[in-house]
Image: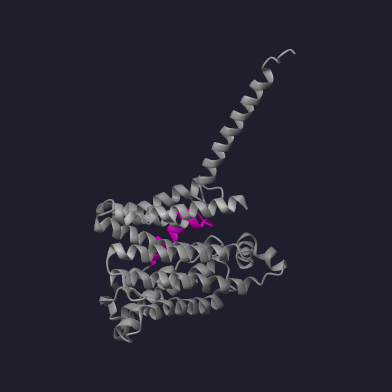
């Protein structure tokens, strides 16, 4: 209970400190990059829910980001619906598509599931490129309205920061509650051993469908938020390279670690922006980084047996040795004669 309260207090302190970032970072470009970190963190959280907690390799998340963005943009541009209706419906439609995809994939093994998600990503990309009457083809949809919540318009980087931060905090709390619930424990059981999970009374196929549906909802609202932030949605943000890029955020930060998802998104969004030259070769350089991580820490920085745990383990080992040394010195001290 004490550890739980301590984690909550640390989380609150982190959020309060983060709220002052727009007052410290005055550069519009830098603030824009930070906003993208917040949005990509939501995508990474949804990927971690599938890959890190359920053990299913999904390489088509960019398709759901695109679906959420296109749906929300079309609802506002063509049907003139309010932002909140378009925003929530984007998540729901992605959850429904995730449910259908989950039905198709629920009996599939690890390798075939990966191929199915890659195929789905390619289908969505071709759909966005060629359905000109709806998606405007390769030109994408321009002039997507900025978010409006309760009459307040988030139309600047400064204002949007608080919208993205609030959305990330809500998504983080919801996903955290899911992972700590019976459903989350069922996901972890399927990840560790599907056969043992089925013998324990867990319907593996149905829980895979639930996992895909829930994760797709969060990916969809993240895609919607991105479209309304950059005021544009393009089919080229739904490529397979983008899916791999988003998957690397979850893996780098730590599989099964929600803070790791935010850390991974921060690293892979901020580092390429340091240099435009680096950005052109980001996939290659990130590939080298991932190979190094797989050799040394397969579950990422904050995942199980990751770099974080190794550092903590080294620190604990040093403290234990120090305590033993002090105890040994105490035992060798001469006792006072009364």
- Location of residue 230 with respect to 293 vertically, above or below: below
Residue pictured at 41% horizontal, 64% vertical = 166
Percent position of residue 314, x then y: 55, 37
Does residue 54 appear in the picture of this structure? Answer: no
Q: Residue furthest top?
A: 337
**In magenta segment, residue 165:** no
- Location of residue 165 with respect to 323 vertically, above or below: below
Is the stretch drawn in magenta largely helix, strand or loop? helix
Residue 122, image quadrant: bottom left
- Location of residue 262 with respect to 317 vertically, above or below: below
Q: Residue 244 versus residue 147: which sits nearer the camera?
A: 147
Residue pictured at 43% horizontal, 73% vertical = 220
The part of the chain drawn in magenta is 240-260
Q: Residue 149 versus residue 128: which sits nearer the camera?
A: 149
Percent position of residue 312, x then y: 54, 41
Residue 225, image quadrant: bottom left
Does residue 294 appear in the picture of this structure? Answer: yes
Numbered marks: total: 0
Tell me: 233 left or right of 263.
left
Residue pictured at 34% horizontal, 61% vertical = 35
Tell me: 24 left or right of 197.
left
Tell me: 122 left or right of 311.
left
Q: Residue 101 versus residue 8: which sits nearer the camera?
A: 8
**In magenta segment, residue 241:** yes
Residue pictured at 39% horizontal, 78% vertical = 84
Q: Residue furthest right?
A: 338
Residue 316, image quadrant: top right
């Amino acid at each position: 209970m004490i550890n739980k309260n301590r984690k909550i207090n640390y989380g609150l302190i982190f959020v309060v400190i983060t709220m002052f970032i727009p007052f410290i970072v005055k550069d519009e470009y830098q603030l824009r990059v930070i906003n993208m970190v917040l949005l990509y963190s939501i995508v990474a959280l949804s990927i971690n829910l599938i890959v890190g907690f359920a053990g299913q390799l999904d390489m088509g998340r960019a398709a759901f980001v695109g679906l959420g963005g296109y749906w929300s943009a079309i609802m506002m541009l063509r049907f003139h619906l309010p932002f909140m209706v378009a925003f929530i419906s984007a998540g729901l439609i992605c959850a429904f598509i995730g449910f259908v995809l989950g039905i198709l994939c629920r009996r599939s093994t690890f390798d075939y599931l990966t191929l199915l998600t890659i195929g789905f990503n390619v289908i969505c990309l071709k759909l966005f490129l060629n359905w000109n009457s709806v998606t405007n083809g390769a030109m994408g949809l321009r002039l997507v309205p900025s978010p409006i919540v309760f009459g307040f318009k988030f139309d600047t980087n400064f204002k949007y920061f608080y919208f993205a931060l609030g959305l990330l905090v809500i998504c983080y709390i919801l996903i955290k509650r899911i992972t700590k619930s019976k459903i989350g424990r069922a996901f972890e059981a399927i990840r560790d051993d599907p056969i043992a999970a089925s013998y324990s009374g867990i319907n593996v196929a149905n829980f895979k469908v639930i996992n895909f549906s829930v994760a797709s909802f969060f990916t969809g609202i993240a895609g919607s938020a991105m479209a309304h932030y950059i005021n544009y949605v393009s089919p080229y943000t739904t490529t397979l390279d983008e899916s791999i890029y988003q998957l690397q955020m979850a893996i780098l930060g730590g599989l099964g670690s929600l803070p790791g998802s935010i850390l991974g998104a921060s690293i892979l969004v901020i580092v390429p922006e340091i240099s435009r030259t680096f950005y052109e070769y980001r996939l290659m350089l990130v590939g080298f980084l991932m190979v190094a991580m797989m050799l040394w820490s397969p579950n990422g920085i904050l995942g199980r047996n990751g770099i974080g745990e190794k550092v903590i383990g080294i620190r604990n080992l040093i403290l234990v040795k120090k305590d033993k040394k002090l105890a040994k010195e105490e035992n060798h001290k001469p006792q006072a004669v009364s």
